Amino acid sequence: MRILIVYAHHEPTSFNGAMLDVALQALVGQGHEVRISDLYEMRFDPVSDRRNFVTVADADRLDQQVEERLASAEAGFTPDVAAEIEKLLWCDLLILQFPIWWMNMPAIMKGWIDRVFALGIAYGGGRWFDRGRLSGKSAMLAITVGGDRSVYSGDGMYGSIEIATHSINHAILGFSGFSVVEPFVVYGPGRMTDHERRGELERYANRLVHIGTAPRLPQVCSVDFVPSAQRHSA
């Protein structure tokens, strides 16, 4: 399997850094081909605007989707974006690894998605969810949160962890066609003993070794959301 890990943490000696090391060891040990986009190490620019393109559809007004459509058709993305698009299209499994900050992904990870999941690449042409442009691929979030499991429960201070993960899993990955693996979550690694952290790393390695049988989230059937008149005329 071809696996792309997009990694967003600025400190190599962090628990996230240890997770990345464990992932690489576990996946390569299973014979998978692994590529890593370490966004901080790459100094990836997260701002999505004209800097994404070498082509120009309209020099007077920036319509992002218009520019993305042209760039997708004419290989008009700048080298940094084109390289990440190539990795995205190459992989069978995409792993997005990051710490949850303010109940969301770090800005650099969101910027990677904004620039790389372009019209004509990740979506467009009436293709979404089960008919999405990236269907046939799988994706998984590998995330850490600062608090323990209790504060991210339905009765906890922040509510269910799904509040933080749903929009990513459903409206980004699922919408683009990925079969979405149940996210791997580590709660409060900074509060753990060394023994507990080693246990979580072993749990992550086990998830990756058995990634082919890991549980998947329900996938939307796009035809269920097509207006009835359009459905009957198809």
Image (spheres, rainbow, N blue to C red):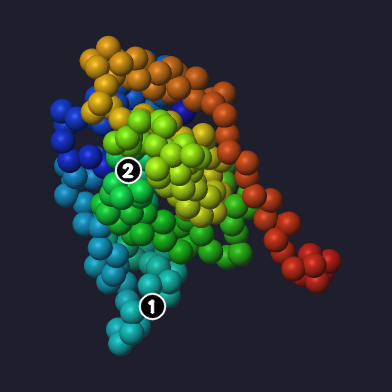
> Across the whole image, how many numbered discs are drawn on residues?
2
Vertical relation: 152 (above or below) 113: above
Answer whether residue 93 is visible to the viewer in this image: no
Q: Amino acid at mark 1?
A: Asp
Q: Which quadrant of the structure image shows residue 46?
A: bottom left
Sooner in the amino-acid sequence: mark 2 or mark 1 = 1
Q: Residue at x 46, y 64 (%)?
A: 119
Q: Residue at x 41, y 61 (%)?
A: 118
Dot 2 crowding, Cα within 10 Å, few <14, some 14–19, many 20+: some
Question: Which numbered mark, 2 or 1, is in the foreground of this view?
Answer: 2
State the quadrant of the C terminus. bottom right
232 relative position to 12: left or right: right
Q: Give coordinates of residue 152: x percent, y percent.
A: 42, 38
Vertical relation: 129 (above or below) 34: below
Vertical relation: 94 (above or below) 68: above
Q: Which residue is mark 2?
A: 100
Q: Give coordinates of residue 62: x percent, y percent.
A: 33, 79
Q: Amino acid at mark 2?
A: Ile
Between residue 204 and residue 33, name the one nearer to us.
204
Q: Residue at x 16, y 36 (%)?
A: 11
Between residue 91 and residue 64, name the one nearer to us.
64
Answer whether residue 178 is visible to the viewer in this image: yes
> Separation of disc 2 and disc 1 at Cα?
31 Å
Please, what secondary structure does the residue beneath circle 1 have?
loop
Vertical relation: 64 (above or below) 215: below
Dot 1 crowding, Cα within 10 Å, few <14, some 14–19, many 20+: few
Q: Which quadrant of the structure image shows residue 187?
A: top left
Q: Residue at x 21, y 52 (%)?
A: 44
Please, what secondary structure does the residue beneath circle 2 have?
loop
Q: Residue furthest bottom?
A: 60
- Disc on res. 63: 1
Proximity of marks 2 and 1: CB atoms separated by less than 8 Å: no
